[in-house]
Image (cartoon, rainbow, N blue to C red):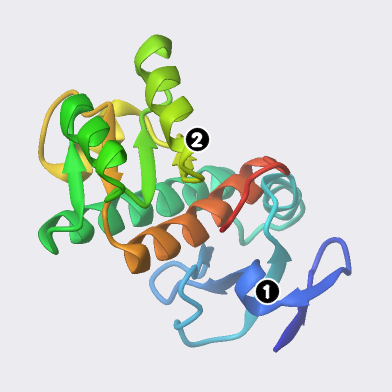
Amino acid sequence: MHKTCHISGAQDEADNMLRFVHAPDDGFLTPDLAARLPGDDIWLANRKELVEKLAAARDDAPSDLAARVETRMRRHLGSLFALARKAGALVIGFTKTEAGLKAGRVKLLIAAHDGAADGRRKLAHKAKAAGIGCFTLLSSDELGMALGQSNVIHAGLTDVGWAKRINRDAGRLAAYLGDTEWETE
């Protein structure tokens, strides 16, 4: 189903856009990333600068609306990592991730963007040689919080289904942040 962006007028599939509704408790616009909340909606193309324009132009939008959207997207990714871990589809740590890459079990490499460049580069090189994507959108703190451990820098998804789902939602966050080179498959 195609929707029209309230700010730019661009049309796109609803899955590629952001939906906002009025919160029942305070009447302010709130992001509805799952597109399930009731009420009249406003659709925007999935770009942070458009959310910032919406927040500046409307009295019923909180000034930090763009930050709220980004925070919810990051938390959603964290919850997906936590679910993948509980499902046994995730290896954590440099050594286990490297072994998973060598054995061909890792389907998506995860590296904290604030981890040491040398370690990230070593695993990214191995992942690239194997044709595996690399996810680098979350910090070590965000990954650690999602996975219930401290200092998580490297991990690997070992299930194709989880890798595709997380890669799709990571692409959504990357697009929101303006990363036009993100590969979703």
Left or right: 22, with 4 as reference point: left
Can you tell which mark lies on residue 148? none
Q: Is residue 138 above or below residue 42?
A: above
Left or right: 17, with 67 as reference point: right
Q: Is residue 66 visible?
A: yes
Residue beneath the point at 28% across and 30% down = 154
| Residue type at tag 1 | Ile
Can you give x and y, in whole percent of width and height, for residue 18 in the image?
62, 66
Where residue 119 sits, quadrant-wise, is top left
Report the front residue among 99 and 146. Answer: 99
In which quadrant will I find the N terminus? bottom right
Within-10-Å neighbours for mark 1: few <14, some 14–19, many 20+: many
| Residue contact between numbered discs 2 and 1, judged by CB atoms under 8 Å | no
Q: Which residue is mark 2?
A: 129
Residue extending furthest toward the right: 9
Q: Which residue is mark 1?
A: 42
Q: Earlier in the sequence, mark 2 or mark 1?
A: 1
Residue beneath the point at 26% across and 31% down = 98
Residue at disc 1, secondary structure: strand
Residue extending furthest toward the front: 103
Q: Is residue 184 above or below residue 13?
A: above
Residue at disc 2, secondary structure: helix
In which quadrant will I find the C terminus? bottom right
Where residue 159 sits, quadrant-wise, is bottom left
Report the front residue among 137 and 62. Answer: 137
Which of the two discs, 2 and 1, sits closer to the camera?
2
Within-10-Å neighbours for mark 2: few <14, some 14–19, many 20+: few
